[in-house]
Image (cartoon, grey):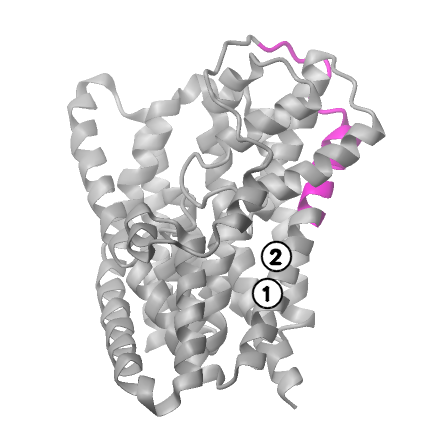
Amino acid sequence: MKKKLNLNITLYILSGLILGVLFGLFMPGRYEFLLPVIQLFSGIYMNALQMMIFPLVFCSLIVGIKDIGSVSATGRVGVQTVTYYISTTMLASLLGLFLPRALSLGTGVTIEMAEGGVEATRFTNLLDTIQNLIPANPIAAFAGGNMLQVLVFAIIIGITCLALKEKAEPFVRVAEAVNDISIKIISIVMYFTPVGIFCSIASVIYANGTDTILALGGVLVALYVTMFLYTLLIYGGLVKLIGKCDVRQFFLKVMPAALNAFGTCSSSATLPISKRCADELNVPNEISALALPLGATINMDAVSIVMSFMIVFFANACGVKISFGMLAVVLLSNTLLSIGTPGVPGGAIASFAALAAIAGLPPGIMGVYISVNTLCDMGATCCNVLGDLACSVAMKETVHLNRK
């Protein structure tokens, strides 16, 4: 029954996605009065998801750490997860740099440039992130949506609960209750996901317009093919070889999260649905509670592909020669900037501005990049969410082996 329900939800979400794309492309001018209504429903849906992100992440992480049972095991799960995310992000950046270079994408293309007016992310942002990992004001971390600080605070609380044992049981029971309440609310929101996806994708497609989509269609197709192959080969390989999970079943069960990520362009807003999919894959809560929110924060494989890909494309189009030494600098910079990119719509724009400056590209290309950022972001977010879930499945098997 659960498998049938999951399949039905997937089909409904896919239908909403397709109808939203068609409506956004072909909505005639006389129906423009519907746009505010569509944006209203899209905003309500996003708010309903985001409403439960931090209660779910905070409480499920505390419960997960308690279920792990020891501080050393918690540290092992955390170290393996971070190692996985950093390794795949560097691999993705490498692929994004060398594939378009080998195919000479952008060569001979004429680009009409305009100033983007975007302030580049400071390259020290990763150091600032490390410095500010421990929140001076946990309430401000929740209110400001600082996921990394919330994660660190939850880990500190969870480890302390392990140390206090029985004394912390009342607080742990409250966390378990809030976790169950959050999951129940998300289960209800899931039934409105097809409508939410329809409204989100329709407004995005309509805002970009058919001309923008067709003008850069070639590079977008190449980019999406790259992300698809990366997802299939890297994530599928990890799931099959390390996670010992059937690849077809994996992609079938994670499809609700993937489609939601595609429609909303937010890995953070997809977290509750990703958690539900991880449960469908029998990933223990002590793993998914840490791997998924951490992935939504630092796992930006597809963002890394997009930024590397577009850097080489724009360099070829503008006649900027990027040496192998500069490629190495861009690779390292891209990995660090990708890790610091927030999992929200448009989070990569400022990071790309910094990377473009490092590569020596003219500032005017930012106007072009911004015009297609959302179209790139949809596929990138979908790919990132699949990477988070693939990590959870792989971790399920490796942690089990380490416990032997």
Which residue: 31% across, 81% down? 172
Answer few, some or many: residues within 10 Å of disc 2's Cα (few below 14, many 20 plus, some between 14 and 19): many
Q: Is 213 left or right of 89, judged from the image as shown? A: left
Q: Position of residue 260 (x, y in %)?
A: 38, 51
Quarter of the rendering occupied by the C terminus: bottom right
Pick the front one: 251 or 49: 49
In magenta segment, residue 232: no
Which residue: 65% across, 38% down? 334
Q: Is residue 182 above or below residue 371?
A: below
Q: Amino acid at mark 2?
A: Tyr
Q: Give the residue furthest to the right.
A: 324
Residue receiving disc 1: 81
Residue receiving disc 2: 85
Which residue: 50% across, 73% down? 287
Q: Amino acid at mark 1?
A: Thr
Pick the front one: 270 or 76: 76
Q: Is 294 left or right of 238, judged from the image as shown? A: left
Q: Is residue 230 above or below residue 248?
A: above
Q: Mark 2 and mark 1: span between their CA atoms?
A: 6 Å
Magenta-highlighted residues: 91-111
